[in-house]
Structures are given as structure tokens and as C-alpha cells.
Amino acid sequence: MIDIDSDTDTQTEDESANTAHPGEPHQEELPFAIVDGVAMTELPRDLYIPPNALEVFLEAFEGPLDLLLYLIKRQNLDILNIPIAEITRQYMEYVDLMKDLRLELAAEYLVMAAMLTEIKSRLLLPRPATELEDEGDPRAELVRRLQEYERYKQAAEDLDALPRFGRDVFPTEADAPFVQVVKPQPKVRVEDLVMALADVFQRARMYSHHHVLSEPLSVRERMSSILAAVGKDKYTDFTSLFSAEEGRRGVIVTLLAVLELMREMLIDLVQAKPLGPIHVRAQSS
């Protein structure tokens, strides 16, 4: 809510702005510069400011609202209870300087100066109580515009603080290291091995009644014959290692030889797809 000072008959706004009420907290004016450890709140009368330096200072403001907001914040004033007389005086000092340097900016700044002068006059002139209630505070429209401008300015500063491509974030190019993908061979399931052995046993039973005498079979000799039959760069059908004429004993000896060669990491069993044929391959040394 905007604070309206209705006691205009006994005390002007200039006097009320400079008079400290007892018991109320008072905050000192913020300095605009520190020289040799001393805070400066006012420019020295004998200070010489080169025209070029003043022009750079004026270019920092983006318009009359920006200048007005700077004057309010520099003195840490309440934006809802602006001392119009003091702010108008300071504003006009800046406008007078701008007329000499930047004539193209004088128009919009003079419009704000006229608005401040009008508000100051309306606050100083005595008015009936009924008119005060109807019109409200003459500063209300100015306060609304200042608050709206302050919100937009803060939003723009927040956006500018975000990382910007080409200013804070830069692209980079790097080649990914070459990685040779080795496709693992599918693992042979125990169920598939059992099914292959069942087929071999089935064929062995067909020839078992033809053998009356059995020859002694050696697992070590069968391992040597399997290594001779299996090449390093070729795949040999698993069932081709078994001979049906040797019967069950031959199947068992061959199976033991295959398992022993796998344990010694001399051969691998490879199956390209589920339920597919099983092949034997010699391992690389």
C-alpha cells in the first residue's frame, strides 16, 4: 500500500523528508564511491569531471525510468514513499547535464521531468479531504511504472547471467577412440549338449549288436585324434567326432576326451543359434 502524507498544510515534503522521527530506524545513504577509504555520498564542489567521462556515465542508463530507479536505490529510499521534491531536484540536475551532451535523449527525459514536477506540485498544493480520497496518491502511477520496470530489468539481468553459447560455453570437437568390438561366441547350453549326446547314443545302439569283441579305448589317444581332426581356423561338427561302430564305450571315451580338452582350454564348443548344430574349434594359443 502507498503511504500518503496528508499533512501538507503544516510541513512541506522537503522538510518531512529531511526530518528524522524519534524512535524510527534510520538507514544511512549508500555511498556511490569510496576514495582513500572514505565513503562519498555527494560530489565535491571542486571536482572536475571531463565531458567524455560524464558521457560514458550517462550511457549506462537505458532511459528516464532507469535513471530514476538509480537515484532511488542510491539513497536506499522506499519506492512506495518517494520524496518527490528531492528526487525531482536530483533528476533535473542530471537532465541539465544531458542536454549539453546528448540532445537526442533530452525529449524522453524531459517528459519524465515534467511528470515529476506535476506530481510535486499536486503534493504541495492543499486539497480538500474529499478530493484526496477520490484521486488517491499522485505518485501511484509513477510507482507502478517503476515497479514494473524494476521487474523487467531484474528478469533481463537473470537471463544475462545464464550461460550463453559462444560467451560462456564453447563447442569442442574430439574423435572417439577406436574400439574393436569383439562379438562373443554364443555359449553352449548343457541341455543342447545332452540332446546331441542322446542322438549319438541312439545311433550307437543301432550298431552295438554287431560288435562281439571290444577293443581297449584310451582317452588320451582319443584326445590326440580329436586335436588332429579339429583345425585352428575351421569348425568341425561335434557329432562327427563320434563313431557309431564303437558303441557306447566309444561315445563315452570320446565325450571324456572332449571334456578333458575343454578343461585344458585346447578346444571350444560353438553354437551359432539356439537348438542349432554344435561345432568344435581349436583354441588360439
Image (spheres, helix red, strand yellow):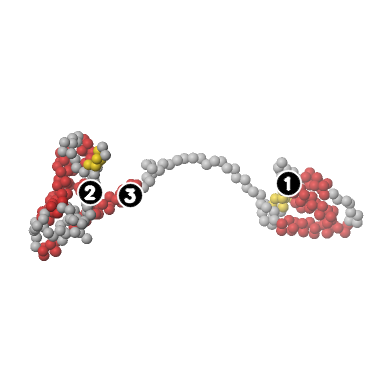
Q: Measuring from the top left, give residue 101's x and y in whole percent.
A: 17, 38
Give the alpha-carbon distance from disc 2 to disc 1, as whole Å: 88 Å
On-image quarter of the C terminus: top right
Dot 3 surroundings within 10 Å: few (below 14), some, or many (20 or more)?
Answer: few
Whether tag 1 and tag 3 are in contact, CB under 8 A, the answer is: no
Q: Measuring from the top left, give residue 213's x and y in whole percent.
A: 91, 54
Secondary-structure class at tag 3: helix
Q: Residue under label 1, please give it.
A: 265
Residue at image position (33%, 49%) is 159
Can the viewer see residue 103? no
In the image, is 21 to the left or to the right of 269?
left
Q: Residue under label 2, please give it.
A: 28
Where on the picture, by quarter, is residue 124?
bottom left
Q: In terms of sequence position, does the residue under pointer 2 or pointer 1 come before the other?
A: 2
Q: In terms of sequence position, does the residue under pointer 1 or pointer 3 come before the other?
A: 3
Secondary-structure class at tag 1: loop
Kind of residue sitting beneath label 2: Glu
Q: Residue under label 3, please give it.
A: 158
Residue at image position (81%, 54%) is 252
On-image quarter of the N terminus: bottom left
Return the residue nearer the eye: 51 or 269.
51
Q: In terms of sequence position, does the residue under pointer 2 or pointer 3 come before the other?
A: 2
Q: Measuring from the top left, give residue 143's x and y in whole percent.
A: 20, 55
Kind of residue sitting beneath label 3: Asp
Residue at image position (49%, 40%) is 174
Give the alpha-carbon distance from disc 2 to disc 3, as whole Å: 28 Å
